[in-house]
Amino acid sequence: MATLDNLVPPRANLGGAAFTLTCVGSGFAEGDIIAFNNSDEPTIFVSPQQLTTQVKAFMATVAGDFPVMVKAASGDTAAVSFSFLPVDASNGSLLLQQLTNVLTADGTKEALRQASDDQIRTIRR
């Protein structure tokens, strides 16, 4: 029977960029699926001890703990909590932070960040 011991990373900042989540445990097999907050996600079998999936920036809109489990042929694992941490809103809105994480690296991201910083300075005056 498959077991899920921990997640790498176990937490991330709300509104951050997409990242790879690794499920660490034992008894994993090809075809097992990671369920993130009760949603089946595309899963890559790495080994009987590791599975991975991509966590996208939009998968959570509020800070808190979210269940992660593995749906395995040998039986579903117990859930392990993944935490999205609150964002320090003093540097702009969560929406702007999320937008800057999904824009391309062609300079648009930096231009938007600069415009956001300029707006914040104007508001604080």
Image (cartoon, grey):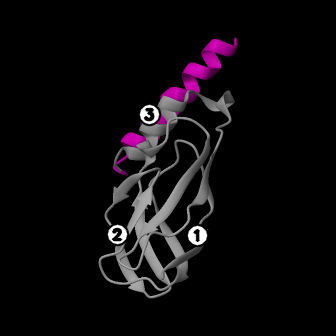
Which SS class for mark 3?
helix
For disc 3, the marked residue is 112
Q: Closer to the camera, 37 or 123?
A: 37
Magenta range: 105-125
Q: Between marks 3 and 1, how big is the CA–CA gap?
A: 31 Å
**What amino acid is at disc 1?**
Val
Q: Position of residue 20 (x, y in %)?
A: 46, 66
Q: Closer to the camera, 32 or 18?
A: 32
Q: Is residue 67 left or right of residue 52?
A: right
Tell me if mark 3 has few (under 14), some (14-19) or many (20+) residues whose alpha carbon lies within 10 angstroms of its own: some
For disc 2, the marked residue is 43
Which SS class for mark 2?
loop
Which part of the image, by quadrant, shows the C terminus?
top right
Tell me if mark 2 has few (under 14), some (14-19) or many (20+) residues whose alpha carbon lies within 10 angstroms of its own: some
Q: Is residue 107 above or below residue 124?
A: below
**What amino acid is at disc 2?**
Thr
Q: Closer to the camera, 15 or 90?
A: 15
Label at residue 40: none
Task: Pick whichever of labels 3 and 2 is earlier in the sequence.
Answer: 2
For disc 1, the marked residue is 8
* Residue at screen point 54% across, 31% down: 94
Q: Is residue 116 in the magenta section?
A: yes
* Residue at screen point 49% across, 27% down: 115
**Magenta-colored segment: predominant secondary structure:** helix
Task: Pick whichever of labels 3 and 1 is earlier in the sequence.
Answer: 1
Q: Position of residue 69 (x, y in %)?
A: 49, 63
